Image (cartoon, rainbow, N blue to C red):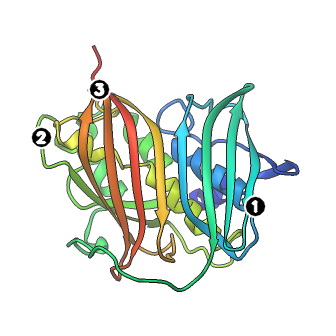
Amino acid sequence: MNKALAALLDLLDLEQIEEDIFRGVSRSAIVPRVFGGQVAAQALVAAGRTVPGDRLPHSLHAYFLRLGDPGAPIVYTVDRIRDGRSFTTRRVVAVQHGQPIFHLSASFQTYEEGLEHQAPMPPAPDPETLPTAAQMLPRYADHFLDSGVVDRMLEARAAVDLRYVDAPPYGSVGEPREPRSQVWFRTNGKLDGAIDAPLLHVCLATYVSDMTLLDSVLLAHGRGGWATGDVVGASLDHAMWFHRPFRADEWLLYDQESPSASGGRGLGQARIYTQDGRLAISVIQEGVVRVPR
């Protein structure tokens, strides 16, 4: 396990300051605000700490209300909405400087057998044949706003091995493409014996899910995103459904597309598959996508 992954695990290991109240800190981000995937993952950790260990998340629905301050702690308050025979529901509010910045509802379920079918996994190359971030990002240094973007992106993503199947948005500026993007990802190290497993694997996938989901919106218009300065954006809401068991330290294919962009907003939807073809997670997110004036 590398130091960056160990630091991310520490980030998700929230401090309990009172019953159903937890406190988290932030790590350095690419932009001067709290990374949305971090808040979502920490909120899910807080919810999971109040749920019996035999119940894992099967869905979450969240809203990003305000930009987070990376220099201040975040307090997570959990409301125990319902504890049923099979399902448990929790609501979490994340607060900074006396104001809510994030709201999450999550539902947990005990495992049970049921009907089985899934959408097939789309074609994708072997992740081991694709360039790492350290190999890919320097190729696009001339596209970025400043010379420090590459280093900031590598630092912010050092805990995750994330590999693009095709060029990312900042690699094809001015060249509109089909609004679809694929990335493979896994943690940079194994998680055997890590705290909160298997909940931790779900929380880590939640963390990563906010990194690239709106890429397909940008690809449709040949925009490079924040890194090139031709778009200003932020996550608005985020929903995930966890269908089947998976491990975040094994390769996962994030197959993403955008069905619509309008009104200064863009919609991304995605499916996450295990390397052997099992559909593990479905994701939908809407975000602000504005062209600077």
Mark 1 vs mark 2, CA separation in Å: 44 Å
Of the numbered discs 1 and 2, the one sitting upstream in the chain is: 1
Residue at position x 20%, y 73% in the image: 123
Residue at position x 40%, y 34% in the image: 148
**Percent x, y of residue 288:** 38, 31
**Tag 1 secondary structure:** loop
**Percent x, y of residue 152:** 45, 40
Q: How many marks?
A: 3
164 w.r.t. 264: above or below: below
Residue lying at the far bottom of the rendered structure:
113
Q: Which residue is mark 1?
A: 49
**Tag 2 secondary structure:** loop
Residue lying at the far right of the rendered structure:
18
Mark nearer the viewer, 1 or 2:
1
Mark nearer the viewer, 1 or 3:
3
Q: Are marks 1 and 3 in contact (CB under 8 Å)?
A: no
Mark 1 vs mark 3, CA separation in Å: 38 Å
User: The C terminus lies in which quarter of the figure?
Assistant: top left
User: The N terminus lies in which quarter of the figure?
Assistant: bottom right
Q: Is residue 1 visible?
A: no
Left or right of 60? Residue 97 is: right
Left or right of 203? Residue 173 is: left
For residue 147, what is the image quadrant? top left
**How dense is the environment of label 1, judged by Cα within 10 Å: few (below 14), some, or many (20 and up)?**
some
Q: Which residue is mark 2?
A: 176
Q: Which residue is mark 3?
A: 263
Mark nearer the viewer, 2 or 3:
3
In the rendered structure, which amino acid carries the disc numbered 3? Gly
Of the numbered discs 2 and 3, the one sitting upstream in the chain is: 2
In the rendered structure, which amino acid carries the disc numbered 2? Pro
**Tag 3 secondary structure:** loop
Of the numbered discs 1 and 3, the one sitting upstream in the chain is: 1
